Amino acid sequence: MNLNPSDIAYWEKMDHDFRAVVGEWFAWNAETLRLLPKYQDIRTGYLRMAEAASISSEAFAREWKRSVGPGDHADIAESLREESRRFRKPHRAIDVVLNVCKAEIRFAKQWGAVQSEDELKEFENNEVMRWPSDHSLVVDHGFYAIYIAWRPDTRIIVPDNRPTLLRALALDKSLWRAISPRQFEELVAYLYETLGCRATLTQATRDFGADILAVHSGPLDSELLIAVQVKKYAADHKVGLKGVFELHGAVTHYRADTGHLITTSDFTGPARRFAESNRYHLVGLASLEKELPRLFL
């Protein structure tokens, strides 16, 4: 993927602001719990995060990944995915996190460190300044946005629950209605991986008509590049010529060898004829429902 230098510079500025504000938020949380023995494990985690924020974005992201945990926390990871998708762009999630943390720190100055269980109860019940952990998931969404959804060269890996979800879809066809468009793209990318391809999701915007780029290895070190477009449509909303024209543009832009269009609905007659004339492969919901049990059950 070609990275725009201005986008990288903007990400670096946002990362700097994120580490400064959220790092201070963790430090304040740690200070709040300083004299409460029963919360020292939580306080230690806050101190580790505050220290990592002062070192580098890599250290901050790595410490957050450790705190989220490995595969046992797949449900948490999926929650972060889903909540982050509520924002049209990842940086909007980051803006929300910064505003929440700044507000908490600003109002917290009237409290200082909590000295006793009674003060802790008063702190938790205060109408203006809520207990810090109420906003911990909001902060997690910010981490997901800046270090996974938006970072150009992210190295963080969130536990992968796509095989589980695909098995569920193979068993219950009604679940197709519940998944989001981006989630459908992720599932299709995993399908290509299962079939032996290297699959990469393109960026959410300005993708030039391809949601996934899949590379299939052939004989004698040859490779076939497939531009894949994904349409999460209602069953009665067929993909028309506009969809296959977009796929045609993606094949041209990425200089792909062929194009695939995959949808949760079906295709109009003109769309099928155009795809056939260009040797593009179309996959509708009926084909998906037939293929999933073979692969995942």
Image (cartoon, helix red, strand yellow):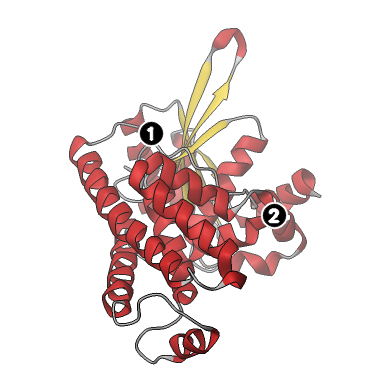
Q: Is residue 245 above or below residue 165?
A: above
Taking the spot 61% from the left edge, 36% from the top edge, the residue there is 193
Mark carried by residue 251: 1
Q: CA distance from mark 1 to mark 2?
A: 39 Å
Q: Residues within 10 Å of mark 1 (few under 14, many from 20)?
A: many
Instruction: Give the image location of residue 209, x and y in percent.
Output: 36, 44
Residue 85 in sight here: no
Q: Secondary structure at mark 2?
A: helix
Type of amino acid under label 1: Val
* Front residue of 99 and 115: 115
Q: Quadrant of residue 99?
A: bottom left
Q: Residue furthest left?
A: 6
In this rendering, would 261 be left or right of 204?
A: right
Q: Is residue 186 above or below residue 56?
A: below
Type of amino acid under label 2: Asp
Q: Is residue 242 above or below residue 192?
A: below
* Front residue of 70 and 24: 24
Q: Is residue 173 above or below residue 64?
A: below
Q: Secondary structure at mark 1?
A: helix
Instruction: Give the image location of residue 62, x and y in percent.
Output: 48, 43
Instruction: Give the image location of residue 208, x and y in percent.
Output: 31, 42
Mark carried by residue 72: 2
Instruction: Give the image location of residue 87, x and y in percent.
Output: 36, 65
Give the mark toward the camera: 1 or 2.
Answer: 2
Mark carried by residue 162: none
Residue 291 in sight here: yes
Looking at marks 1 and 2 on the same chain, the residue that comes earlier in the sequence is marked by 2
* Front residue of 77 and 228: 77
